[in-house]
Image (tube, grey):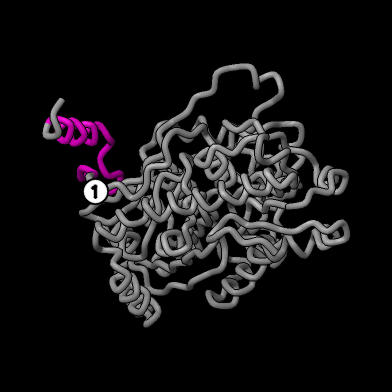
Amino acid sequence: MNTDDAGIAAEKADVFAAPCRFCGAVLRTTMVDLGMSPLCETFLLPEELNRPEVFYPLHVRVCSECLLAQVQEYVTPEDIFDEYAYFSSYSTAWLDHAKAYAGQMTERLGLDGDSLVVELASNDGYLLQWFVERGIPVLGVEPAANVAQVAVDKGIPTRVEFFGDEYARTLVAEGLKADLVLGNNVLAQVPDINSFVAGITTILTPGGTVTIEFPHLQRLMDGNQFDTIYHEHFSYFSLLATERIFAAHGLTLFDVEELWTHGGSLRVYGRHADDTARPVTDAVHRLRDAELAAGLDDMATYERFGAQVEATKRRILSFLVEARDAGKSVVGYGAPGKGNTLLNYCGIRTDLIDFTVDRNPYKHGRFLPGTHIPVHPPEALDAAKPDYVFILPWNLRDEIAAQLAHVRDWGGRFVVPIPEVDVW
Ligand SMILES: [Zn+2]
Protein backbone atom coordinates (compact mmCIF):
# COMPACT_ATOMS: atom_id res chain seq x y z
CA MET A 1 0.00 0.00 0.00
CA ASN A 2 1.53 3.37 -0.94
CA THR A 3 1.24 6.48 1.23
CA ASP A 4 -1.77 7.81 -0.65
CA ASP A 5 -3.62 4.51 -0.26
CA ALA A 6 -2.84 4.49 3.47
CA GLY A 7 -4.27 7.98 3.77
CA ILE A 8 -7.43 6.97 1.97
CA ALA A 9 -7.74 3.86 4.16
CA ALA A 10 -7.40 5.97 7.32
CA GLU A 11 -10.04 8.38 6.07
CA LYS A 12 -12.38 5.50 5.25
CA ALA A 13 -11.74 3.98 8.68
CA ASP A 14 -12.99 7.17 10.29
CA VAL A 15 -16.18 6.94 8.26
CA PHE A 16 -16.94 3.79 10.27
CA ALA A 17 -17.02 5.90 13.44
CA ALA A 18 -20.55 6.82 14.50
CA PRO A 19 -21.74 10.32 13.52
CA CYS A 20 -22.00 13.16 16.05
CA ARG A 21 -24.60 12.17 18.65
CA PHE A 22 -26.01 15.69 18.75
CA CYS A 23 -25.95 17.05 15.18
CA GLY A 24 -25.26 13.95 13.07
CA ALA A 25 -22.18 15.33 11.29
CA VAL A 26 -19.29 13.01 10.32
CA LEU A 27 -16.54 13.19 12.97
CA ARG A 28 -13.13 13.86 11.37
CA THR A 29 -11.00 15.32 14.18
CA THR A 30 -9.23 13.16 16.79
CA MET A 31 -8.75 14.83 20.16
CA VAL A 32 -6.98 11.87 21.81
CA ASP A 33 -6.71 8.15 21.16
CA LEU A 34 -6.16 6.20 24.40
CA GLY A 35 -6.00 2.83 22.66
CA MET A 36 -8.03 -0.14 23.88
CA SER A 37 -9.47 -0.27 27.40
CA PRO A 38 -12.03 -2.35 29.34
CA LEU A 39 -15.12 -0.70 30.85
CA CYS A 40 -13.71 1.19 33.80
CA GLU A 41 -16.36 0.26 36.38
CA THR A 42 -16.18 -3.49 35.73
CA PHE A 43 -14.43 -4.55 38.93
CA LEU A 44 -13.50 -8.21 38.66
CA LEU A 45 -14.14 -11.02 41.13
CA PRO A 46 -11.23 -13.45 41.74
CA GLU A 47 -12.88 -16.15 39.62
CA GLU A 48 -13.07 -13.72 36.67
CA LEU A 49 -9.29 -13.17 36.50
CA ASN A 50 -8.70 -16.30 34.47
CA ARG A 51 -11.16 -15.34 31.71
CA PRO A 52 -10.92 -13.16 28.60
CA GLU A 53 -11.83 -9.50 29.04
CA VAL A 54 -13.43 -7.25 26.45
CA PHE A 55 -11.46 -4.12 25.53
CA TYR A 56 -13.03 -1.28 23.53
CA PRO A 57 -11.44 1.60 21.60
CA LEU A 58 -11.14 4.72 23.77
CA HIS A 59 -10.90 7.37 21.10
CA VAL A 60 -12.22 10.91 21.54
CA ARG A 61 -13.27 12.80 18.45
CA VAL A 62 -14.60 16.36 18.18
CA CYS A 63 -17.42 17.49 15.94
CA SER A 64 -16.30 20.40 13.77
CA GLU A 65 -19.93 21.47 13.33
CA CYS A 66 -21.19 21.67 16.95
CA LEU A 67 -17.90 21.30 18.92
CA LEU A 68 -19.13 18.32 20.97
CA ALA A 69 -16.20 16.08 22.00
CA GLN A 70 -17.30 12.47 22.22
CA VAL A 71 -16.46 8.78 22.33
CA GLN A 72 -18.53 6.28 20.46
CA GLU A 73 -21.14 4.31 22.41
CA TYR A 74 -19.91 0.70 22.29
CA VAL A 75 -22.04 -0.58 25.12
CA THR A 76 -25.58 0.22 26.12
CA PRO A 77 -26.27 2.19 29.28
CA GLU A 78 -28.21 -0.89 30.44
CA ASP A 79 -24.92 -2.82 30.48
CA ILE A 80 -23.17 -0.06 32.40
CA PHE A 81 -25.81 0.77 34.97
CA ASP A 82 -27.19 -2.66 35.76
CA GLU A 83 -25.07 -2.82 38.91
CA TYR A 84 -23.14 0.40 39.09
CA ALA A 85 -20.39 0.34 41.67
CA TYR A 86 -20.14 4.07 42.32
CA PHE A 87 -21.93 5.30 45.42
CA SER A 88 -21.65 9.08 45.67
CA SER A 89 -22.09 9.16 49.42
CA TYR A 90 -18.61 7.83 50.04
CA SER A 91 -16.88 11.18 49.42
CA THR A 92 -17.14 13.68 52.25
CA ALA A 93 -16.28 16.62 50.02
CA TRP A 94 -18.96 15.64 47.51
CA LEU A 95 -21.59 15.35 50.26
CA ASP A 96 -20.72 18.85 51.49
CA HIS A 97 -21.02 20.11 47.92
CA ALA A 98 -24.50 18.58 47.60
CA LYS A 99 -25.67 20.01 50.92
CA ALA A 100 -24.46 23.51 50.03
CA TYR A 101 -26.20 23.27 46.66
CA ALA A 102 -29.56 22.39 48.28
CA GLY A 103 -29.30 25.40 50.57
CA GLN A 104 -28.34 27.79 47.77
CA MET A 105 -31.06 26.65 45.40
CA THR A 106 -33.80 26.65 48.04
CA GLU A 107 -32.99 30.29 48.77
CA ARG A 108 -32.35 31.46 45.20
CA LEU A 109 -35.51 29.87 43.75
CA GLY A 110 -37.74 30.24 46.81
CA LEU A 111 -38.49 26.49 46.95
CA ASP A 112 -41.03 25.30 49.54
CA GLY A 113 -43.46 22.48 50.32
CA ASP A 114 -45.41 23.16 47.11
CA SER A 115 -42.35 22.85 44.86
CA LEU A 116 -40.97 19.75 43.18
CA VAL A 117 -37.28 19.00 42.72
CA VAL A 118 -36.44 16.27 40.21
CA GLU A 119 -32.92 14.90 40.05
CA LEU A 120 -31.79 12.96 36.99
CA ALA A 121 -29.39 10.16 37.95
CA SER A 122 -30.10 10.70 41.64
CA ASN A 123 -27.71 7.95 42.75
CA ASP A 124 -28.25 6.89 46.38
CA GLY A 125 -30.11 10.09 47.31
CA TYR A 126 -26.89 11.84 48.43
CA LEU A 127 -28.27 15.20 47.24
CA LEU A 128 -32.07 14.94 47.39
CA GLN A 129 -31.83 14.07 51.09
CA TRP A 130 -30.95 17.72 51.81
CA PHE A 131 -34.15 18.92 50.10
CA VAL A 132 -36.19 16.27 51.97
CA GLU A 133 -34.71 17.61 55.21
CA ARG A 134 -36.11 21.05 54.27
CA GLY A 135 -39.59 19.63 53.59
CA ILE A 136 -39.36 20.13 49.81
CA PRO A 137 -40.94 17.35 47.69
CA VAL A 138 -38.46 15.45 45.53
CA LEU A 139 -38.32 12.73 42.93
CA GLY A 140 -35.18 10.91 41.90
CA VAL A 141 -34.76 9.13 38.57
CA GLU A 142 -31.93 6.61 38.75
CA PRO A 143 -31.17 3.82 36.26
CA ALA A 144 -29.04 1.61 38.54
CA ALA A 145 -31.47 -0.54 40.53
CA ASN A 146 -29.10 -1.43 43.39
CA VAL A 147 -28.18 2.24 43.91
CA ALA A 148 -31.80 3.44 43.66
CA GLN A 149 -32.81 0.93 46.34
CA VAL A 150 -30.42 2.59 48.82
CA ALA A 151 -32.24 5.90 48.21
CA VAL A 152 -35.68 4.34 48.60
CA ASP A 153 -34.57 2.75 51.88
CA LYS A 154 -33.63 6.25 53.08
CA GLY A 155 -37.15 7.51 52.26
CA ILE A 156 -36.28 9.33 49.05
CA PRO A 157 -38.86 8.65 46.26
CA THR A 158 -36.85 7.21 43.37
CA ARG A 159 -37.86 5.65 40.04
CA VAL A 160 -35.58 3.09 38.39
CA GLU A 161 -35.61 4.53 34.88
CA PHE A 162 -33.47 6.00 32.12
CA PHE A 163 -34.54 9.60 31.70
CA GLY A 164 -35.47 10.82 28.23
CA ASP A 165 -38.30 12.66 26.55
CA GLU A 166 -40.56 9.62 26.58
CA TYR A 167 -40.23 9.12 30.33
CA ALA A 168 -40.58 12.88 30.93
CA ARG A 169 -43.97 12.70 29.15
CA THR A 170 -44.96 9.80 31.42
CA LEU A 171 -44.17 11.88 34.50
CA VAL A 172 -46.07 14.90 33.13
CA ALA A 173 -49.06 12.61 32.44
CA GLU A 174 -48.94 11.71 36.15
CA GLY A 175 -49.27 15.43 36.93
CA LEU A 176 -45.60 15.93 37.79
CA LYS A 177 -43.81 19.09 36.64
CA ALA A 178 -40.54 20.24 38.17
CA ASP A 179 -39.67 23.70 39.48
CA LEU A 180 -36.07 22.57 39.65
CA VAL A 181 -34.56 19.85 37.48
CA LEU A 182 -30.98 18.97 38.25
CA GLY A 183 -28.45 16.60 36.83
CA ASN A 184 -24.95 16.28 38.21
CA ASN A 185 -22.39 14.38 36.17
CA VAL A 186 -25.06 12.64 34.13
CA LEU A 187 -25.07 14.59 30.85
CA ALA A 188 -21.80 12.96 29.80
CA GLN A 189 -23.32 9.52 30.29
CA VAL A 190 -26.38 10.04 28.12
CA PRO A 191 -26.20 8.32 24.72
CA ASP A 192 -29.28 10.04 23.27
CA ILE A 193 -28.51 13.58 24.33
CA ASN A 194 -31.33 15.04 22.22
CA SER A 195 -33.97 12.95 23.99
CA PHE A 196 -32.48 13.75 27.40
CA VAL A 197 -32.47 17.52 26.94
CA ALA A 198 -35.89 17.47 25.25
CA GLY A 199 -37.15 15.61 28.35
CA ILE A 200 -35.89 18.42 30.58
CA THR A 201 -37.84 20.94 28.49
CA THR A 202 -40.92 18.71 28.78
CA ILE A 203 -40.86 18.34 32.56
CA LEU A 204 -39.84 21.89 33.47
CA THR A 205 -42.60 24.28 34.70
CA PRO A 206 -42.88 27.51 32.63
CA GLY A 207 -40.83 29.48 35.20
CA GLY A 208 -38.70 26.50 36.21
CA THR A 209 -34.93 26.19 36.41
CA VAL A 210 -32.61 23.43 35.33
CA THR A 211 -29.08 23.14 36.67
CA ILE A 212 -26.60 20.76 35.11
CA GLU A 213 -23.10 20.10 36.36
CA PHE A 214 -20.48 18.51 34.18
CA PRO A 215 -16.68 18.44 33.98
CA HIS A 216 -15.55 21.41 31.89
CA LEU A 217 -13.77 20.36 28.69
CA GLN A 218 -11.48 23.38 28.90
CA ARG A 219 -10.26 22.28 32.36
CA LEU A 220 -9.82 18.71 31.12
CA MET A 221 -7.56 19.93 28.32
CA ASP A 222 -5.66 22.54 30.34
CA GLY A 223 -5.03 20.05 33.15
CA ASN A 224 -4.06 16.94 31.13
CA GLN A 225 -7.06 15.23 32.70
CA PHE A 226 -7.15 12.47 30.12
CA ASP A 227 -8.03 9.95 32.86
CA THR A 228 -11.50 11.48 33.11
CA ILE A 229 -12.15 10.02 29.64
CA TYR A 230 -13.82 6.64 29.73
CA HIS A 231 -16.37 4.62 27.81
CA GLU A 232 -19.15 5.44 30.26
CA HIS A 233 -18.57 9.15 29.54
CA PHE A 234 -19.84 9.50 26.01
CA SER A 235 -19.57 13.31 25.76
CA TYR A 236 -17.22 16.11 26.91
CA PHE A 237 -18.64 19.62 27.04
CA SER A 238 -17.53 23.16 26.54
CA LEU A 239 -20.00 25.96 27.27
CA LEU A 240 -20.04 26.64 23.52
CA ALA A 241 -21.29 23.13 22.70
CA THR A 242 -23.68 22.98 25.68
CA GLU A 243 -25.38 26.24 24.74
CA ARG A 244 -26.05 24.92 21.22
CA ILE A 245 -27.49 21.65 22.49
CA PHE A 246 -29.83 23.30 24.99
CA ALA A 247 -30.88 26.01 22.52
CA ALA A 248 -31.88 23.31 20.04
CA HIS A 249 -34.44 22.16 22.62
CA GLY A 250 -35.82 25.58 23.56
CA LEU A 251 -33.68 26.16 26.64
CA THR A 252 -31.47 29.20 27.28
CA LEU A 253 -28.45 28.97 29.55
CA PHE A 254 -28.73 32.17 31.57
CA ASP A 255 -26.07 31.69 34.22
CA VAL A 256 -22.94 29.64 34.82
CA GLU A 257 -20.62 28.96 37.74
CA GLU A 258 -17.19 27.38 37.67
CA LEU A 259 -16.82 24.71 40.37
CA TRP A 260 -13.83 22.82 41.83
CA THR A 261 -15.52 19.41 41.52
CA HIS A 262 -14.14 16.64 39.29
CA GLY A 263 -11.07 18.65 38.39
CA GLY A 264 -13.07 21.72 37.34
CA SER A 265 -16.74 21.64 36.45
CA LEU A 266 -19.40 23.97 35.17
CA ARG A 267 -22.82 24.40 36.70
CA VAL A 268 -25.07 25.86 34.04
CA TYR A 269 -28.50 27.32 34.81
CA GLY A 270 -31.14 26.95 32.13
CA ARG A 271 -34.69 28.20 31.63
CA HIS A 272 -37.26 28.09 28.87
CA ALA A 273 -36.15 30.40 26.04
CA ASP A 274 -39.33 32.48 26.38
CA ASP A 275 -38.85 32.99 30.16
CA THR A 276 -37.05 36.26 29.45
CA ALA A 277 -37.58 37.75 32.91
CA ARG A 278 -34.20 36.27 33.77
CA PRO A 279 -31.59 37.80 31.43
CA VAL A 280 -28.37 36.04 30.47
CA THR A 281 -25.71 37.04 33.00
CA ASP A 282 -22.26 38.49 32.36
CA ALA A 283 -20.80 35.22 33.66
CA VAL A 284 -22.11 33.43 30.56
CA HIS A 285 -20.71 36.06 28.20
CA ARG A 286 -17.33 36.05 29.96
CA LEU A 287 -16.94 32.27 29.87
CA ARG A 288 -18.02 32.07 26.24
CA ASP A 289 -15.37 34.69 25.38
CA ALA A 290 -12.76 32.80 27.41
CA GLU A 291 -13.47 29.57 25.52
CA LEU A 292 -13.15 31.36 22.19
CA ALA A 293 -9.88 32.95 23.34
CA ALA A 294 -8.63 29.45 24.28
CA GLY A 295 -9.37 28.24 20.75
CA LEU A 296 -12.19 25.83 21.61
CA ASP A 297 -13.85 26.63 18.27
CA ASP A 298 -10.64 25.60 16.42
CA MET A 299 -9.96 21.93 15.61
CA ALA A 300 -6.17 22.47 15.91
CA THR A 301 -6.59 23.14 19.65
CA TYR A 302 -8.11 19.69 20.14
CA GLU A 303 -5.47 17.98 18.02
CA ARG A 304 -2.67 19.37 20.21
CA PHE A 305 -4.17 17.67 23.27
CA GLY A 306 -3.16 14.16 22.12
CA ALA A 307 0.58 14.99 22.14
CA GLN A 308 0.23 16.53 25.60
CA VAL A 309 -1.30 13.28 26.90
CA GLU A 310 1.51 11.14 25.51
CA ALA A 311 4.08 13.32 27.29
CA THR A 312 2.16 12.94 30.56
CA LYS A 313 2.15 9.15 30.20
CA ARG A 314 5.94 9.11 29.80
CA ARG A 315 6.41 11.18 32.97
CA ILE A 316 4.13 8.93 35.05
CA LEU A 317 5.94 5.79 33.90
CA SER A 318 9.35 7.37 34.54
CA PHE A 319 8.40 8.06 38.16
CA LEU A 320 7.10 4.54 38.79
CA VAL A 321 10.00 2.76 37.08
CA GLU A 322 12.56 4.86 38.96
CA ALA A 323 10.78 4.23 42.27
CA ARG A 324 10.79 0.47 41.66
CA ASP A 325 14.40 0.48 40.52
CA ALA A 326 15.26 2.21 43.81
CA GLY A 327 13.52 -0.59 45.73
CA LYS A 328 10.59 1.59 46.86
CA SER A 329 7.04 0.28 47.32
CA VAL A 330 4.03 2.03 45.76
CA VAL A 331 0.42 1.45 46.83
CA GLY A 332 -2.59 3.07 45.22
CA TYR A 333 -5.27 5.03 47.03
CA GLY A 334 -8.77 4.89 45.60
CA ALA A 335 -10.29 2.84 42.80
CA PRO A 336 -12.18 5.45 40.77
CA GLY A 337 -13.13 4.95 37.16
CA LYS A 338 -10.56 7.56 36.17
CA GLY A 339 -7.84 5.45 37.79
CA ASN A 340 -8.64 2.61 35.45
CA THR A 341 -8.30 4.75 32.34
CA LEU A 342 -4.92 5.98 33.54
CA LEU A 343 -3.61 2.55 34.60
CA ASN A 344 -4.72 0.84 31.38
CA TYR A 345 -3.46 3.58 29.07
CA CYS A 346 -0.08 3.64 30.83
CA GLY A 347 0.13 -0.17 31.18
CA ILE A 348 0.56 -0.04 34.97
CA ARG A 349 -0.06 -3.39 36.70
CA THR A 350 1.11 -5.06 39.91
CA ASP A 351 4.64 -4.82 38.56
CA LEU A 352 4.50 -1.10 39.41
CA ILE A 353 1.69 -0.71 41.99
CA ASP A 354 1.23 -3.52 44.56
CA PHE A 355 -2.45 -2.94 45.26
CA THR A 356 -4.90 -0.13 45.85
CA VAL A 357 -7.29 0.63 48.72
CA ASP A 358 -10.77 2.10 48.62
CA ARG A 359 -13.42 3.08 51.18
CA ASN A 360 -16.21 1.51 49.13
CA PRO A 361 -16.87 -2.01 50.47
CA TYR A 362 -18.33 -3.06 47.10
CA LYS A 363 -14.84 -2.99 45.64
CA HIS A 364 -13.05 -4.91 48.41
CA GLY A 365 -11.72 -8.28 47.27
CA ARG A 366 -12.23 -7.30 43.64
CA PHE A 367 -9.64 -6.43 41.00
CA LEU A 368 -9.29 -3.44 38.69
CA PRO A 369 -10.41 -4.15 35.12
CA GLY A 370 -7.62 -4.76 32.64
CA THR A 371 -4.73 -4.25 35.05
CA HIS A 372 -5.94 -6.78 37.70
CA ILE A 373 -4.57 -4.68 40.56
CA PRO A 374 -6.30 -5.90 43.77
CA VAL A 375 -8.55 -3.54 45.78
CA HIS A 376 -8.28 -3.81 49.58
CA PRO A 377 -9.91 -1.96 52.50
CA PRO A 378 -8.01 1.18 53.68
CA GLU A 379 -6.46 -0.70 56.64
CA ALA A 380 -4.27 -2.62 54.19
CA LEU A 381 -2.38 0.59 53.52
CA ASP A 382 -1.41 0.92 57.19
CA ALA A 383 -0.28 -2.71 57.30
CA ALA A 384 1.90 -2.36 54.19
CA LYS A 385 3.45 1.03 55.12
CA PRO A 386 4.43 1.82 51.50
CA ASP A 387 7.06 4.40 50.54
CA TYR A 388 4.60 6.09 48.18
CA VAL A 389 0.81 6.45 48.24
CA PHE A 390 -0.26 6.96 44.63
CA ILE A 391 -3.54 8.93 44.81
CA LEU A 392 -5.74 7.98 41.86
CA PRO A 393 -8.62 10.43 42.61
CA TRP A 394 -6.13 13.32 42.35
CA ASN A 395 -9.01 15.84 42.37
CA LEU A 396 -9.44 14.99 46.09
CA ARG A 397 -5.70 15.11 46.83
CA ASP A 398 -5.88 17.52 49.78
CA GLU A 399 -8.79 15.75 51.45
CA ILE A 400 -7.10 12.35 51.07
CA ALA A 401 -3.67 13.52 52.20
CA ALA A 402 -5.29 15.04 55.30
CA GLN A 403 -7.11 11.78 56.08
CA LEU A 404 -3.86 9.86 55.63
CA ALA A 405 -1.61 12.25 57.57
CA HIS A 406 -0.30 9.27 59.60
CA VAL A 407 1.45 7.97 56.46
CA ARG A 408 4.16 10.51 57.37
CA ASP A 409 4.82 8.56 60.61
CA TRP A 410 6.54 5.78 58.65
CA GLY A 411 8.16 8.22 56.20
CA GLY A 412 5.63 7.64 53.43
CA ARG A 413 5.05 10.25 50.75
CA PHE A 414 2.12 11.12 48.50
CA VAL A 415 2.03 11.16 44.71
CA VAL A 416 -0.53 12.40 42.22
CA PRO A 417 -0.15 11.65 38.50
CA ILE A 418 -2.16 14.59 37.17
CA PRO A 419 -1.93 17.38 36.05
CA GLU A 420 1.79 16.59 36.46
CA VAL A 421 3.53 13.96 38.55
CA ASP A 422 3.78 15.60 41.96
CA VAL A 423 5.46 14.01 44.98
CA TRP A 424 5.18 15.54 48.46
ZN1 LIG B 1 -22.01 17.73 16.07
Image quadrant where residue 7 sits: top left
Type of amino acid at the residue the image marks with label 1: Cys
Q: Nearer the viewer, residue 205 or 310?
A: 310
Report whether the residue tagged 1 is closer than 8 Å to ligand 1. Answer: yes
Residue 362 spot, x, y in % from top left: 73, 37
The magenta segment is 5-27
Q: Which residue is mark 1?
A: 23
Q: Nearer the viewer, residue 242 or 246?
A: 242
Task: Mark yes or no: residue 394 visible.
Answer: yes
**Residue drawn at (43%, 49%), measured in percent from left and top?**
310
Q: Residue furthest front?
A: 326
**Residue drawn at (70%, 56%), measured in percent from left and top?**
91
**Residue drawn at (27%, 44%), measured in percent from left and top?**
20
55 displayed left or right of 261: left
Image quadrant where residue 100 sits: bottom right
Residue 103 spot, x, y in % from top left: 64, 72
Q: Which quarter of the image is occupied by the N terminus?
A: top left
136 displayed left or right of 270: right
